Image (cartoon, rainbow, N blue to C red):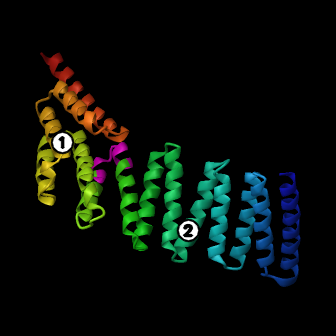
Amino acid sequence: MDDHIAQGQELAKKAENKLHACCSLFGSNFEDAAQLFHKSATSFKLAKSWDKAASLFLKSSKCHLKLDNKYDAANAYVAAAHCYKKTSPSGAISCLNKAVTIFAEIGRHIMAAKYSKEIGELYELHQDIENARLYYEKAAEHFEIGDAATSVIQCKLKVAQFSAQLQQYQKAIKIYEDVARQSLDSNLLKYGVRGHLLNSGLCLLVQGDFVAITNSLERYQDLDPTFCRTREYKFLTDLAASIDEEDVEKFSRVMKEFDSITPLDSWKSTLLLRVKDALKLKEMEEDDLT
């Protein structure tokens, strides 16, 4: 490890000397310095000196920008970000943002999408759902420009998931319905339709509008005639009935029966508990009136 550090320091010194020589003698000739900074960063990376490695990748990026070599500059920002991920999530996000901006400027939208998604994943990891939603949305936009349909859907589903968590139910419903509609035409994706419609239906249930729920379930049958024969459809109709009847016990029973066969994930459980809590509150208010 000490050997890697010593080598990194020597390479960094050569890069600085080359840079100063370039500036004084040859103006914009930064190519050698960029390569030396990159090699130095790699040595510090092998020594697991993450912050130092990141700072040298950033110097390499600046040299590439002086040469108007934006693609290599963006990749150097990505390399710096991956070092900062070990020590500083905010530093990683800052570097990835710069890379995304450059990739978008030069028309590399798939790359811009990939690293927007990576930023979203970092925010998700640190429970910053609002920013996670924002960057998955940006990733979807770039994937769409790059004509990567499957990746667009994956990112949009994450946006819907986070929107529901943030109680932006209408946004989530629209995404789930749109994705379900698009998936029907794909042999690969059509088997996920009932799951998307279930998620949309759960968002509708949280809003507590029985008429809207009933109308939507009718639309879902028009969208996919097989949906009415699924457990997901029965689950939604039984839940809607228990809400209409204001029957907390029935609601809990329906949840338990479905969960015993198809375990509910934490996202669905959270939405259903919101509905259940609202039902309980309504029940308590009515008891107080009597």
Name the one closer to the observer, 184 or 16. 184
Q: Residues within 10 Å of mark 2 (few under 14, many from 20)?
A: some
Principal SS element in the magenta part? helix
Across and down, in percent, residue 176 comes to 28, 55
What x and y, as percent, mark residue 21? 88, 77
Q: Is residue 219 above or below residue 107?
A: above
Whichever of callouts 1 and 2 sits on the residue coming sooner in the sequence is: 2
Location of residue 261 by image quarter: top left
- Image side of residue 170 versus residue 2, left or right: left
Residue 167 lies in the magenta stretch = yes
Q: Taking 187 as reference, is 237 above or below it?
A: above
Residue 8 appears in view:
yes
Q: At x 74% / y 68%, what residue is drawn?
A: 60
What residue appears at the point 79 percent right and 81 percent down from the top-left corner? 29
Q: Nearer the viewer, residue 4 or 72?
A: 4
Q: How many marks?
A: 2
Instruction: Say if 197 sits above or below 57 in the image.
Output: above
Magenta residues (range) = 162-172
Q: Which mark is residue 138?
A: none
Residue type (three-letter) at the residue carrying disc 2: Thr
Tell me, yes or no, if residue 209 can be seen here.
no
From the image, which quarter does the C terminus lie in? top left
| Helix, strand or loop for disc 1 | helix
Quarter of image, res 152 = bottom left
Q: Amino acid at mark 1?
A: Leu
In the picture shown, does residue 152 fall above or below 173? below
Rate crowding at label 1 as few (under 14), some (14 to 19) or many (20 or more) other CA atoms within 10 Å. many
* Res 236 label: 1
Q: Give the Cα separation between the discs numbered 1 and 2.
A: 43 Å
Q: Which residue is mark 2?
A: 101
Q: Position of residue 203 (x, y in %)?
A: 26, 45
